[in-house]
Amino acid sequence: MTFAVTPDAFSDEADAVREIEARGWHALTFPAPAEVSEWHWHDFEALIFILEGTLQIEFEDGRDPLICSPGCRVDTDERVVHREVTDGYQAVFGISVNPAQITSPINKPVAELV
């Protein structure tokens, strides 16, 4: 299970949405606040297209963090323990499940990973 970063992966928000929809996934655009999140995992795959700001993703297993800036796409797998470190960013998120089916909390505690 991996996360991957592709620099210069898209030209604008519409380009990102087209790529998400071509996969049959769901596109959501919103600002992410400044945070250093707790270690967590997600029960869905996602694409993150960074529009503004910078996102750093750190991994509990000690691998090198990923640094994502505008124009970058992050491909994420489900069930990977990580945390986000950011001063805030704007992104288009492509998620593999219908947003109405996402269970709360979206950031699953590490203790629940089996």
Image (cartoon, rainbow, N blue to C red):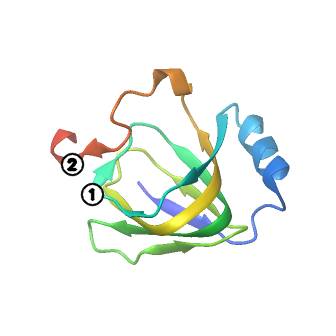
Please give the label number shown on residue 65.
none
Please give the label number shown on residue 110.
2
Amino acid of disc 2: Val
Q: Position of residue 105 (x, y in %)?
A: 33, 35
Q: CA distance from mark 1 to mark 2?
A: 7 Å
Q: Earlier in the sequence, mark 1 or mark 2?
A: 1
Q: Secondary structure at mark 2?
A: helix
Drawn side of residue 8 relative to residue 1, left or right: right
Drawn side of residue 76 relative to residue 49, left or right: left
Number of disc labels: 2
Q: Secondary structure at mark 1?
A: loop
> Given contact means CB atoms under 8 Å apart, are the residues at marks 1 and 2 in contact?
yes
* Viewer-nearest residue: 86 or 43: 86
How dense is the environment of label 2, judged by Cα within 10 Å: few (below 14), some, or many (20 and up)?
some
Per the image, the residue denoted by label 1 is 39
How dense is the environment of label 1, judged by Cα within 10 Å: few (below 14), some, or many (20 and up)?
some
Q: In the figure, 90 relative to 44: above or below?
A: below
For the C terminus, the image quarter is top left
**Residue 101 visible, this orientation:** yes
